[in-house]
Amino acid sequence: MPLDPSLARAVGWFRSQPQMVERCGDVIRQSFDEVFDGQRTGRYRLNQLSPVEKTHIGTRVEIRIQDEFSLQRGRRMDYLVDGQEVDAKWSIRSRGWMIPREAVGELCLCMTADDDHSAFSVGIVRADDANLRTSANQDKKRQFNDEGMAAMAWLANPGVLPENLLLHLSKDARSAILNHDLSGQQRVNQLFRRVHNRVVRREVVLTVARQHDGPKRVRDARKALQPEGIIVLGHQGSHPRIAEGLRIAAPPKGSWIAARVVRAEPDDPDSVVIANEPWRLATPDDPACAGPLNYR
C-alpha cells in the first residue's frame, strides 16, 4: 500500500492527544444522552428515538469532537487535523458510513458505537474510489468495501463506551426504579437502593428523577437510605477515601456510587473508618443495620 503522508499525520495527531480514546468515548456518551434528553423524556435507549432524532446523534458527535479537541473547521471538509482536511462520518452500525461524492478521495474520521455492549470504534481512512463500493444509494452515497475497511487506521477498536446504566439493568430493577407511580425522590431512592457498587452518572439520576434538581435528590436519598445501611458516595470530601477503603470504584466528578455497609471489627483488613467507626461492605448474609450518619 503506497504511503499516505496526510493520513499518517492525521492519525499521528489524534494518537498524540492525552487520553484520546477516553475522551472520544465521553463525547459519544454525551451525544447519546443529549439526544435521549432523559430529564424531560425519560428515554434511555435508541429504539425510543425517531429516525430523525437518531440522525441528530451524529451531528452532536461531530460538534463535540471538534470542541473536545479544539479542531478548526476545514475549508472543504469538517475539520483541519494538523493541517489535513478530514470529514466526520458517523454511523449507528459498523461499516454503515455513507460517503457522498464530495468526500471521495478525502480523509474520513469514521465513528460508531454499540450502546448495548458499551463499545465504540473510531478510525481514519481515505475514501478513495478503490476503497468504496461501486454501487450507491439514491443520494449517490457509497459505503466502504472490504479493502476500505482493511485500510482503516483504527484509533479505538473497540474502545469502552461509558455504561448506559438503565439499559443494562435487569427488567425488574429498571421497572421498580422508573415506576411512574413514585415521586422523583422515591425513584432516586429506588435507584440507589437497588444499584450498588456501580457508578451512576448524573444523566442517569436526571432521567430517573425527571426534575431539574436531580442531584439534590441524591443528597436526600442519603438520608432516606441511611436506616438501611446504604451509603451514597460522590467525588468530594472523604468519599474517595471511603470508596478506596471499601474497594469499590471512586466515582468521577458528577457521578455517585452506592453500597450497603455494616459495622466491622477494628482489625478487619477490609474495613474503612467512616464517622469514627470501622465499616465494611455488607454481604448478602449480613442482616440490615443502620449505616453511618455523617460521612462527608
Image: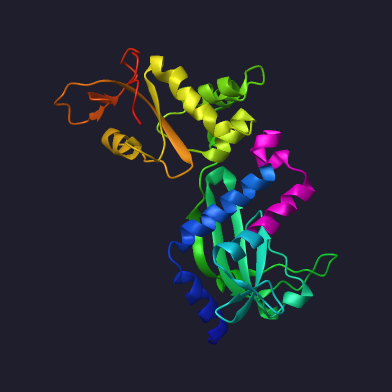
Q: In the depicted view, which residue is nearer to us: 29 or 235?
A: 235
Residue 44 location in percent, x, y?
A: 64, 38
Q: Quadrant of residue 292?
A: top left
Residue visible at 45% across and 44% down in the picture: 253
Location of residue 266 in the rendering, given as x and y in whole percent from the top left corner: 16, 24
Q: Position of residue 197 (x, y in %)?
A: 40, 32
Relative placement, left or right, of 167 versus 289 is right
Q: Which residues are magenta?
A: 37-61
The image's colouring method is rainbow
Compared with 115, 72 (above or below) is below
**Which residue: 52% across, 22% down?**
190
Main SS class of the magenta portion in the image: helix
Name which residue lies at 48% across and 23% down.
221
Q: Is residue 4 visible?
A: no
Magenta stretch: includes residue 263:
no
- Left or right: residue 277 compared with residue 75: left
Quick check: is 42 in the magenta stretch?
yes
Look at the picture and state if 288 lies above or below 31: above
On the picture, is 262 further left or further right than 110?
left
Quadrant where the image shows the C terminus: top left
Judge by depth and name the residue closer to the eye, 222 or 114: 222
The N terminus sits in image quarter: bottom right
Q: Is residue 119 above or below residue 109?
A: above
Front residue of this view, candidates 206 and 27: 206
- Residue 188 in the image: above or below residue 140: above
- The answer to whether residue 240 is seen in the rendering is yes
The image quarter in which residue 79 lies: bottom right
